[in-house]
Image: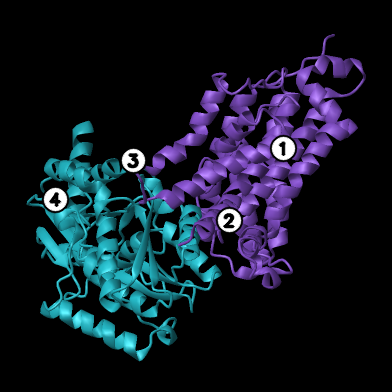
Chain colours: A cyan, B purple
Amino acid sequence: MKESLLTLLAMAAMSATALAADIKPALVYGTGGKFDKSFNEAAFNGAEKFKAETGIEYRDFEPTGDTQGEQAIRNFASRGYNPVVAVSFAWTSAIEKVAAEFPDTQFVLVDSVVDKPNVRSVVYAEHEGSYLVGVLAGLASKTGKVGFVGGMDIPLIRKFECGYEQGARAANPNIEVLQNMTGTTGAAWNDPVRGGELTKNQIDQGADVIYAAAGATGLGVLQTAADNGKFSIGVDSNQNYLHPGSVLTSMVKRVDLAVYNAFVDSKGDKFTPGVQALGVAQDGVGWALDDYNRSLITPEMQAAVDKAKADIISGAVKVHDYMSDNSCPE
Amino acid sequence: MEFVDIFISILGSTIRLSIPLIFTALAGLFSERAGVFDIGLEGKMLAAAFASACAAYITGSAWLGLLSGIGVSVAFALVHGFASITNRGNQIISGVAINFIVAGLTIVLGQAWFGQGGRTPQLPNTARFSPITLPGVDALRDVPVLGPLYANVISGNNILTYFAFAAVPISWWILYRTRFGLRMRAVGENPGAVDTAGISVTWLRYRAVICAGILCGLSGTYLAIAQSAAFIKDMSAGKGYIALAALIFAKWKPVPVMFACLLFGFLDAFANFMQGKSVPLIGEVPVQIFQALPYILTCVLLAGFIGVARPPKAGGVPYVKER
């Protein structure tokens, strides 16, 4: 009796998988939280878009600490979720371990590279996108000083800063770039109070355009800039709508595309492992222009940033990548 | 940037960062001087931040936000009082429990109500305490040093900042110049004597924790709707503990509490400023050194190097009436 029950169960399970041509996608966010209006929210939007188009449900998980990521990824993989998408450099070693344990599961890692036959690594040329918003900042600044507030002090965020600095300098060779990092732990992505304080500090020192690359901490940066009547630049998602008239533009990083494409490719059996590098040329990064900031962008700024974009695509301008040698040219 | 400008910028930052510490440390002062240790300052502050952000968002009024922040904080203070005064439970455990409950509850409720991962929606400026410009800023603007000092440090803060600095002398006056204050101090040193005089120890201690609740409510409200424009999970970020350290550092006295909080706020502001700047001869100093300084200073004090910090004698001991 027991055996026949088991067989029945097994058959039911088999038929279930047979019927489900649909995939069971899963998504693990970074520690900034799903609704950071920035990086993680972009990933969420990509997954939601997939769900709306295909009707396929997905599961997601918000790790609250650095140790939960690996657990979540392994959990999804062992419960048969496929593909498993992890957004954040913090899950690099987790993906490396879990991908070896589940060779038949497709993994996608955003912002970092893991070399495994079942892992797709999506990396962005943030320095190129930051260069573009740097050009805008350089042109918009009246004081000749622009600021940068980063989240956690890691090479990836330095890469944002370095690109921004190069862009600002291209627009105005005498520009001074002030920079601060919020912290050295994961909590730095979620500390808008300190973000706001660092921003006020830079404003006091004369900065009038401040670029935030700090997840949810950036909300404090944008808020403080708006409170003090200065310009700010959002990051990852389009944040122009948060403070119309104060957010000059946003450096958009299409994390939503990485998630959406991963789900779609997996569904259509077109999943490819390896590194996908998305830059300005692939529209993986860029600057946001919409009704909220159109009045802030003058025709000269528009022309300059379009030219910078064309130059990067054509190769006439080569933006230095901080992570290539861990240094930024002065 | 000129030296004076740097100094004024850091000073302004110091004020902004010290306010929640001052409120919270004064809250601890009331509670602990009455003999009730309060490690739950952090939790009450967080609860008040959440409540004020929710109320300000729904009603659109900063004052109603403040009111509900204080209300919720007092409610938690009463829970602490009920556990540790009426039921004579362990004060530390009750306080820690409050911290844990609040840390979880705010996120769960926030997610259930607003669906933004425990964050409350961004507040419009009308629902926040905005900076107030004091009269005479423009007249004084051209006066060297004094002008910018007045404009950026003394003026241009929100109303809660002035409340905080007013709360210091008021606390001093209550503690040292009123009958209630005298009895409160006595109940923290020798509750038996107070009881013998025919005064209710329980009622006195309850009043003290309610005072603590009100002050924590102010500090939480400052965090959520004056300094920021929304509640963010864990936004108190350990300030309750720093305030406790300041309280010990100031040896449980109101005016030194203010200076200790200003010192700790200054260290924070200085750390923000020093980031990435190099000091002559030494090079770049890691900001963590400045961030750790409040704790280090408190340890040094407790080790007895800077005078002796003597807590209220009856602190942490529930009062049992002899029968």
Q: Are marks 4 and 1 on the same chain?
A: no
What number is the disc on residue B282? 3
Query: In what element is the residue under mark 2?
Result: helix
Label 2 sits on what residue type? Gly
- Res A317 seen here: yes
- Residue A74 lies, with reference to residue B191, above or below; the image says below
Neighbours of disc 2 within 10 Å: few (<14), some (14-19), many (20+): many
**C-beta proximity under 8 Å, tags 4 and 1:** no
Q: Quadrant of residue A217?
A: bottom left
Depth check: B75 or A6 in front?
Answer: B75
Residue at the image point whose x is 36% and y is 42% from the top: B286
Residue at the image point whose x is 62% and y is 37% from the top: B260
Query: In what element is the residue under mark 4?
Result: loop
- Res A236 seen here: no
Q: Are marks 3 and 1 on the same chain?
A: yes
Label 4 sits on what residue type? Val
What number is the disc on residue B255? 1
Please name which of the two marks, 2 or 4, marks the residue nearer to the observer: 2
Q: CA distance from mark 4 to mark 1?
A: 57 Å
Q: Position of residue A187 (x, y in %)?
A: 40, 47
What number is the disc on residue B12? 2
Query: In what element is the residue under mark 1?
Result: helix
Query: Is A81 placed left or right of B180 in the picture?
Result: left
Q: CA distance from mark 3 to mark 1?
A: 35 Å
**C-beta proximity under 8 Å, tags 2 and 4:** no
